[in-house]
Amino acid sequence: MIDKKGFRLNVGIVLINDRNEVFLGKRRGQHDAWQFPQGGIKPHETLDEAMYRELEEEVGLKPDDVEVLRRTRNWQIYHLPKRFRRYHIKPLCIGQRQRWFLLKLKSKDEAINLHASGEPEFDEWNWVPFWEPIEKVVSFKRRVYRTVLDEFGTQIFKDEFNAEDANS
C-alpha cells in the first residue's frame, strides 16, 4: 500500500537472541546489501498481521518462535534516492513509512529458514552486535536504523543504556 504522500506502508523487524545480538540478512543476489527483515503492509492487514507474515516469509519463523517485546512509538520514514524510484509505476513510491517491532527469538537458531517462501529475500544471515547494522545498512536507511535501535536499546539495555555512548 502506498499512502497519499507516496510512501509505501511497511513493517520492520529487529530480531534479537539471548546475547542481545540482532539478526541481519544479506539480500539475495546482492554482494553487500545487509538489512533487517521488512516488508509491505497489505490492504486490510493489521500491523501485527503484516509483521508475522513478513517474519514467516523472510525468516521462516512463526509466532510461537518469538516474543514481541515492543513496537516503535512512531512511524519512521525514509526517502528512496531518485535513482531507485520507479517513475513508470503508479502510484509513485518515493520511500517507506515503517513501524518497527522488537522480537526476541525463543526457539533455537535452527528454526530460522530463509527458504520458507517461494522467493527468499535473503541468501545469508548472521547474528551481529546490536549497533552494527547502522554501519552495514545502505546509507539512506541509516537514520531510521539509528532511531529504531536507540528506541529499542532502552528496552534491551535498560539501566546501562546511554544513547550518547551509542551514537559516538
Image (spheres, rainbow, N blue to C red):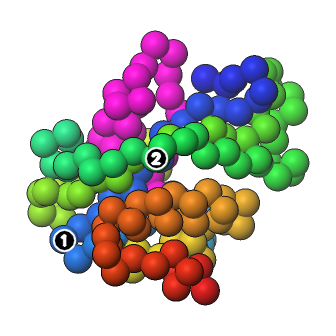
Q: At x 39% / y 45%, what residue is drawn?
A: 71
Quadrant housing residue 130: bottom left
- Of residues 124 and 63, the one nearer the viewer is 63
- Please state the extent of the stretch shown in magenta in the rendering: 33-61
Q: Earlier in the sequence, mark 1 or mark 2?
A: 1
| Count of numbered tags | 2
Q: Return the x and y of residue 88 as percentages of the image width and height.
A: 86, 28
Q: Is 151 within the magenta? A: no
Where does label 2 land, which residue?
72
Q: Is residue 31 left or right of residue 71?
A: right
Q: Is residue 133 left or right of residue 3?
A: left
Q: How far is mark 1 from mark 2, CA to CA?
A: 21 Å
Q: At x 51% / y 58%, what residue is drawn?
A: 148
Q: Return the x and y of residue 164 as percentages of the image width and height.
A: 56, 80
Q: Is residue 122 visible?
A: no
Q: Amino acid at mark 1?
A: Asp
In the image, residue 114 sits, relative to residue 48, either above or below, namely below
In the image, residue 52 sits, relative to residue 130, either above or below, namely above
Q: Which element is circle 2 on? A: loop
- Of residues 152 and 3, the one nearer the viewer is 152
Where does label 1 land, which residue?
18
Disc 1 and disc 2 in contact, CB within 8 angstroms: no
Q: Is 52 within the magenta? A: yes
Q: Return the x and y of residue 91 as percentages of the image width and height.
A: 78, 21
Q: Amino acid at mark 2?
A: Thr
Q: Which element is circle 1 on? A: loop
Q: Is residue 109 left or right of residue 46?
A: left
